[in-house]
Image: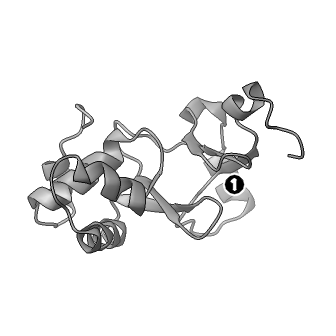
Amino acid sequence: MCNQCNYAELLASAGVRATSNRLRVLGLIGAAGRPVSADEIHQAALDGGPLDRVTVYRSLELFHRVGLIERLKAGGQAWRYHLVDLPHHPRHPHFYCLRCGQLACLEPEALILDLKGLQRAFPARIQHLEIRLEGVCPDCLAQGTAEGA
């Protein structure tokens, strides 16, 4: 798990009871280092003992509803999940590889967005911001699988 996050405290601050299963699911999301699918979370959770797939989905829905995680689309129909803007997990752009399907986190400094300028130019209430770049990742480029992309 991320050693900088107190998941029990995060759950409590969101008004959610910190059960062992919820702590496991939230910890796996925080420790993944990239947005992960429900199946990936379920498979990783099984390493720590039995965990029902329905429990994973219910936990993800709860965490999303109370604002602890965000859902991202990354090809196909499956959502990918990651922690919202927190001190140890700042808001950042993502890169989706059109070849291998991986969704990678980029450093926050990789792409600077002037939100105040955007607010001046378009005075709306922004409720969600997702920046996703698409292309061919370095691993696929190195393997020479970029043809046709």
Identify which residue is drawn at 28% across, 66% down.
56
Q: Secondary structure at mark 1?
A: helix
User: Percent position (x, y) of residue 76?
Assistant: 63, 66
At x 54%, y 42%, the residue is: 92
Picture quarter with the N terminus: top left
Q: Residue at x 44, y 40 (%)?
A: 90
Given residues 1 and 39, the one toward you in this image is 39
Write the residue at 33% across / 54% down.
43
Of 123 and 114, nearer the camera is 114
Quarter location, residue 64? bottom left
Residue 105 vs 21, above or below: the answer is above
Residue 22 position, x and y percent, is 19, 60
Q: Camera-side residue: 122 or 86?
A: 86
Q: Is residue 29 left or right of residue 118?
A: left
Q: Position of residue 95 (x, y in %)?
A: 65, 43
- Name the residue at the right extreme: 148
Furthest-top residue in this view: 142
Image quadrant in which you'd find residue 106: top right
Tell me the residue that label 1 is attached to: 118
Give the number of marks: 1
Query: What type is the residue that disc 1 sits on?
Result: Leu
In front here: 49 or 109?
49
